[in-house]
Structure formats: structure tokens, C-alpha cells
Image (cartoon, rainbow, N blue to C red):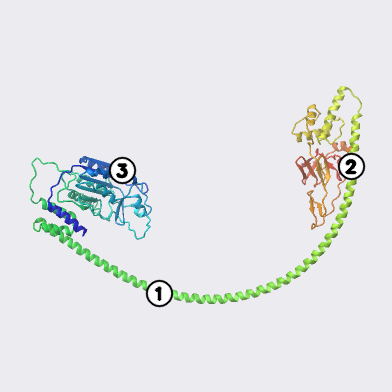
């Protein structure tokens, strides 16, 4: 019915025979999108748009606005500005080259920045064809929209469907303009795609540039020539199509040039023009309308031949459709029968499999029940045997614990008695050692005061070593005698001071600089080393005493002895030689000390490592069962 109304409007316009009027003002908007950002670029749209814009300018258009590679916002702005220019125009033309898409029967132009990840994005990222028709609507005589946008659209292949029933067509959908004197030209018929071409311009754009600017050539005939040329150049693969209607007068895009001889009458011109119009429509309604106007003559016979051709095509199409439908129905029935047979077989096989599964499940359950009963009996016997063994084991443990308590009580009684006797002996030895040390100190002081008078030079030479020896003893580095004899023991004492004080004085002879440096130290410099069982307390070693229920372990600390196995009794350390023998000890080589000794310094005390010995370990005179070692001693490891 829509095609019949279109043909009726065309025939009525032809019968009215209105004369064409020269367009007073012509405006055009040309858009070419090639550089798409999310899909592959197109080669020709920008070239096609530039060529069409140049053609329109050469045709004398008053305004030609050419835009290339236009994003969405700029495309909408361009249409808005163009709509303002068409309000006082007679002819308005919009040419678009690029990608287009059809969604649910509506056509959209795709800007270069569109992503179109889902079908819903089409509404937000594209511009509907209706928006373009709205822009050309104000023109008074001709509204022409040319869409070279029927290319194979890559967005349609990757786009996700949010609604399964939503259709995304191939090419563009058919359009029926609602306004008169409106034409919409597609590069390819609705539902088909157009070629971008291998040359600088697409086949459609090349034909447009060739035929549209011909002076006085009616647009309908011009687009007919465009159609014929595109079909020829594409091997009948691409057929341009025109939708819309014009009146009976010729409507050229470029007015005809005035003839000097004036117009010549041609009685067949109107018939030929109407025949060409019906030929362009190529529908039964168009030819029937032509024959109703021109029932006789050469063109009438041609029209009747076209009707027969259409009838034959329709009959052939009907036969083909009937055969196709019959084949489809036959295939459908065969498929339904095969499907029912397969379903019946599958149902029987499923039933047999289910029965076999149920039988296997029953057998499996019986076996599991038997195994569970046997396992329960076995576990009961194991539990009975375990309880009996636990009872016997508990009885044995109780007896052993009682015996162990008796043994430990006896050991503790013996240990306490020995510890008490040992403490008494240690106290006696400490008192004797303290008295001996005091006597020795007093004797040395008297000896130093009773030295014979010497010459001033000799007195100075003797006083300097003696004074340095005395100061080294004060800071804990000298364990030898203070006699003014600068021997090997005195040299070792000064060497110890150098190491612990961080200085480098010459040790072979006493010097005033070394004496001043030692005097500058207010406290002990060399570390204090104590024998096993003793700990450093200020400048002397004191015995480590453990409380009841504790004893001294190999690390020199008290350990609880309640559950500790008895160990061999440690031998008491032998008393060291008295201070009077220090000179002999200084001359003799140092002997390795047994492991278990403790060395103390300013940072605290620690045990002597196994495999190491104390060098220059001379008793300091502080009381101790095994003797104590002053800060002049040092640890040497192999």
C-alpha cells in the first residue's frame, strides 16, 4: 500500500504538469567519516565527501559545509547549525559517507568516536536518520538526503545483544519520507551492502559526481543514470535505490542553461518522461498507472511487456516459494519423526539404565551394611583390649612414680647436706684468702715506701714505671708487682690497656704520656674474669649461691633439680697461688683453662667457650674457691 500511494503521488504530480521553478537558494552539508577509532578505518568516505563538496560548490550552491571525521557531539552540532540555514533555502542537500547501522528498522549514522559495545549504545553514541530529515525539513522546494553508508558494518558483528529479539540488520532499512518533495538516495537497496571501491572514490560517489551536476537533468533521471552505472561497474552486485516522491515538473539539481533558439516542442517528451519514471520505480502499480494514462502507443506496448515480465517474475517467485516451503515442510516432518524416534529410544535406554542403577544401589547398600557391622565388632574388640592395656600400664606407672619420689627425696637429702658442708668450707677459704690478700697488699706498700734513696735522675726513671704499674693495677690491667721493674708482665698490662682503652702507646718502655692516659681513667678498664661458680660483683668475684631445689648447671646458672638425673660431683677448684708468686706466673706461659669458666667485662659476664683458654689468667687476690681472674686476662681460641 505504501508503494501504491507513492506511485499515486508521482502520477498525480505528473498529471498536474506544474512547471519547474528555478531554485533561488541552495545549501548543502557534506560529511565524510573514514578515521574510525574503535574499528578499521575506511579508505574512501573522506575522499568521496571532498569530491561531492567540490561538485556542489562548482554547481553554484550558495553554502556548502564540508566536515570530515566528525565525532558524535560535532555531528549533532553540525546538523543543528545546518537546520538554521535551511529555513530560508529552496533546496537543502545532506550527503553522508561512512558507517551506518539499522536497529529494529531504524537507521543511524555512526560517528568516528563510537564504540557500540552493546545494542543499547546505539541510542547514545549515534545519530538517527530522522535527525537528518529534521534538519532538511524547512527547505521549500527540494529536500535531498544522500546516504553512502551501506557498507559492511563491523560494529554489528561485535555488538552484544541486551535483548535477544532485537534485530540488527544488514545494510540500511527501507525509508518512506513523510514530507513531500523529499528524496532519500541509498548507495545500495535496503538490506544490502555497498562497495567502498578500489579507486579513490566509491562507485556510488563517482556516479553521483558524474550525473547530478548536469544542467537541467531531472533528479529522478539523474539517479536512474547513477543506478545503471553502479550496476554496470559492480557486476550487478550493488543497486542504488531512491525513496520518496517529487511533483510532475522536472527538478534538476543544477538549472538548465537557457537556449538561444528557444524551447522546441516534443509531443513524446511527456510520455517518455513518465515511462522513464515508471521504469525507475519498476513496480506493477507504476506500470498500471502509466497504462491508465497512456493505453496505446509505443510506450504503452513497452509498459505491457514490463507488466508481463513482472507477472512472470512473480509467478516464478511464487513457484519457487511454494517449492521451498514444501521442501521445508518435508524436511521438518522428517526431522520431527526422527526426533520422536530418538526420544523414544532415549527414554527406553534411560528407563533401563535407571532400573539397573537402582538394583546396583540396593546391592551396594547391603554390602555396606555388612561391612559396617563387621567394622563395629572389630572396633569393640580393639577398645576392650585397649582399656585392659591402659589399666595395666597405669598401675605400672603409679608404682614407678612412687619409687621415683622416694629416690628423689633421698637424693635431695644427700645434696642438701653436701651443699651445707661445701658452703662452710667456702666461707672459711674466702676469709683466709681475704686476709692473705690484705697482708700482701700491705707488704707491697711498705716495700715501695722503704726503697733506698737514689739520685734525682735515677729516682725519676724508677718512679715513672712504678707509677704506671700502680695506675695500671688501679684500672684492673696490671696483675704483677708494683716494683718499678718494667718487665714482660708490665708490658702485657700496658698492651691490655691499649686494647681496651682504644689507644696505641709503646709497651716496651714506660712513658709519661701513657701514665697521663691511665690516670685519666676513673674506673676499671680491663675486664674481670671469674672462675666457674663465681660471678663478677663490682671489682671482685663472689660465689654463685642457688636456692633450695636448684643447683648450678654447666652454663653457670641455677637450674631446678627436682626431676634432673644425678650427675657426677664437680671437683672443687684448687686454690690459686698467693700474690707473691705472680712474677713467676708472669714469666711462665699461660695454661689453657678448663671449659666452664666465666669472663666478665663492662658489658656483663659470659661462659668461656669450649676449645678456648684464658691467657695471662693470674689470680687477683679476690677470695674464691678456685681463684678469681682479673680484667688483665683474655680469651684465646684455637
Q: Nearer the viewer, residue 548 or 266?
A: 548
In the displayed structure, does residue 182 sit left or right of residue 433?
Answer: left
In the displayed structure, does residue 179 sit left or right of residue 484?
Answer: left
Quadrant hosting residue 319:
bottom left
615 is higher (above) or lower (below) than 40: above
Q: x, y (%) of residue 118?
A: 37, 54
In the displayed structure, does residue 354 sit left or right of residue 427?
Answer: left
Earlier residue among tags 3 and 1: 3
Q: x, y (%) of residue 247?
A: 16, 51
Label 1 packing within 10 angstroms: few (<14), some (14-19), many (20+)? few
Comparing labels 3 and 1, the label whose residue is closer to the camera: 3
Q: Nearer the viewer, residue 229 or 292?
A: 292
Q: Which mark is residue 345?
A: 1
Element class at badge 2 = helix
Q: Residue at x 22, y 65 (%)?
A: 318
Earlier residue among tags 2 and 1: 1
Which residue of the protein is positioned furthest toward the top in this rendering?
456
Q: Which mark is residue 433?
A: 2
Res 35 visible: no
Image quarter (top left, top right, bottom left or bottom right) of the N terminus: bottom left
Decide: marks 3, 2 in contact (CB < 8 A)? no
C-alpha span from label 3 to label 1: 65 Å
Decide: marks 3, 1 in contact (CB < 8 A)? no
C-alpha span from label 3 to label 2: 113 Å
Comparing labels 2 and 1, the label whose residue is closer to the camera: 2
C-alpha span from label 2 to label 1: 114 Å
Q: x, y (%) of residue 551?
A: 81, 52
Label 2 packing within 10 angstroms: few (<14), some (14-19), many (20+)? many
Element class at badge 3 = strand
Q: Nearer the viewer, residue 164 or 352?
A: 164
Disc 3 designates what residue?
68
Q: x, y (%) of residue 246?
A: 18, 51
Amino acid at each position: 500500500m505504501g508503494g501504491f500511494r507513492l506511485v499515486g503521488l508521482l502520477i498525480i504530480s505528473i498529471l498536474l504538469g506544474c512547471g519547474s521553478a528555478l531554485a533561488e537558494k541552495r545549501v548543502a552539508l557534506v560529511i565524510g567519516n573514514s578515521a574510525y577509532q574503535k574499528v578499521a578505518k575506511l579508505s574512501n568516505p573522506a575522499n568521496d565527501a571532498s569530491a561531492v563538496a567540490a561538485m556542489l560548490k562548482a554547481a553554484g550552491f550558495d553554502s556548502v559545509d564540508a566536515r570530515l571525521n566528525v565525532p558524535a557531539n560535532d555531528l549533532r552540532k553540525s546538523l543543528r547549525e545546518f537546520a538554521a540555514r535551511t529555513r530560508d533555502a529552496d533546496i537543502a542537500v545532506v550527503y553522508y559517507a561512512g558507517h551506518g547501522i539499522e536497529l529494529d528498522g531504524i537507521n543511524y549514522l555512526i560517528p568516528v568516536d563510537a564504540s557500540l559495545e552493546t545494542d543499547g549504545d546505539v541510542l547514545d553514541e549515534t545519530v538517527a536518520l530522522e535527525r537528518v530529515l529534521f534538519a532538511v525539513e524547512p527547505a521549500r522546494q527540494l529536500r535531498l538526503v544522500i546516504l553512502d553508508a551501506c557498507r559492511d558494518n563491523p560494529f554489528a558483528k561485535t555488538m552484544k545483544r541486551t535483548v535477544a529479539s532485537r534485530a540488527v540488520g544488514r545494510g540500511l532499512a527501507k525509508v518512506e519520507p513523510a514530507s513531500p518533495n523529499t528524496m532519500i538516495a541509498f548507495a545500495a537497496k535496503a538490506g544490502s551492502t555497498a562497495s567502498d571501491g578500489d579507486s579513490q572514490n566509491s562507485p556510488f560517489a563517482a556516479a553521483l559526481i558524474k550525473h547530478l551536476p548536469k544542467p537541467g537533468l531531472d533528479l529522478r533521471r539523474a539517479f536512474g543514470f547513477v543506478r545503471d552505472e553502479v550496476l554496470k561497474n559492480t557486476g550487478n552486485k550493488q543497486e542504488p535505490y531512491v525513496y520518496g516522491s517529487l511533483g510532475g515538473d522536472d527538478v534538476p539539481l543544477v538549472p538548465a542553461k537557457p537556449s538561444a533558439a528557444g524551447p522546441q516542442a516534443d509531443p513524446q517528451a511527456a510520455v517518455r518522461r513518465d515511462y522513464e519514471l515508471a521504469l525507475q520505480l519498476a513496480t506493477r502499480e507504476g506500470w498500471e498507472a502509466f497504462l491508465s494514462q497512456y493505453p496505446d502507443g509505443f510506450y504503452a506496448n513497452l509498459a505491457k511487456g514490463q507488466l508481463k515480465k513482472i507477472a512472470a517474475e512473480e509467478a516464478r517467485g511464487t513457484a519457487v516459494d511454494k517449492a521451498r516451503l514444501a521442501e521445508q515442510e518435508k524436511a521438518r516432518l522428517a526431522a520431527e519423526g526422527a526426533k520422536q524416534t530418538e526420544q523414544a529410544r532415549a527414554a527406553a535406554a534411560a528407563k533401563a539404565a535407571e532400573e539397573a542403577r537402582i538394583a546396583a544401589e540396593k546391592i551396594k547398600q547391603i554390602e555396606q551394611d555388612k561391612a559396617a557391622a563387621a567394622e563395629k565388632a572389630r572396633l569393640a574388640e580393639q577398645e576392650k583390649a585397649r582399656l585392659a592395656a591402659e589399666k595395666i600400664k597405669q598401675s605400672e606407672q603409679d608404682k614407678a612414680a612412687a619409687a621415683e619420689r622416694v629416690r628423689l627425696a633421698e637424693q635431695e637429702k644427700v645434696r642438701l647436706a653436701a651443699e651445707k658442708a661445701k658452703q662452710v668450707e667456702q666461707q672459711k677459704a674466702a676469709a683466709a684468702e681475704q686476709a692473705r690478700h690484705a697482708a700482701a697488699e700491705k707488704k707491697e706498700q711498705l716495700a715501695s715506701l722503704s726503697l733506698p734513696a737514689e739520685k734525682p735522675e735515677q729516682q725519676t726513671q724508677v718512679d715513672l714505671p712504678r707509677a704506671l704499674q700502680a695506675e695500671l693495677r688501679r684500672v684492673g690491667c696490671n696483675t704483677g708487682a708494683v716494683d718499678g721493674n718494667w718487665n714482660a708482665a708490665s708490658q702485657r698490662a700496658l698492651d691490655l690497656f691499649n686494647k681496651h682503652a682504644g689507644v696505641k702507646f709503646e709497651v716496651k718502655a714506660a712513658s709519661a704520656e701513657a701514665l697521663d692516659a691511665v690516670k685519666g681513667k676513673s674506673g676499671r678498664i680491663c675486664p674481670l674474669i671469674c672462675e666457674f661458680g663465681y660471678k663478677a660483683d663490682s671489682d671482685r668475684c663472689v660465689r654463685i649461691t642457688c636456692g633450695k631445689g636448684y643447683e648450678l648447671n654447666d652454663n653457670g646458672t641455677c637450674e631446678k633439680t627436682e626431676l634432673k638425673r644425678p650427675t657426677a660431683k664437680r671437683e672443687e677448684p684448687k686454690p690459686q697461688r698467693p700474690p707473691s708468686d705472680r712474677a713467676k706466673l708472669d714469666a711462665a706461659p699461660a695454661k689453657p683453662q678448663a671449659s666452664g669458666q666465666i669472663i666478665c667485662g663492662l658489658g656483663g659476664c659470659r661462659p668461656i667457650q669450649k676449645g678456648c683458654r684464658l691467657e695471662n689468667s693470674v689470680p687477683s687476690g679476690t677470695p674464691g674457691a678456685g681463684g678469681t681472674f682479673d680484667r688483665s686476662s683474655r680469651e684465646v681460641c684455637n
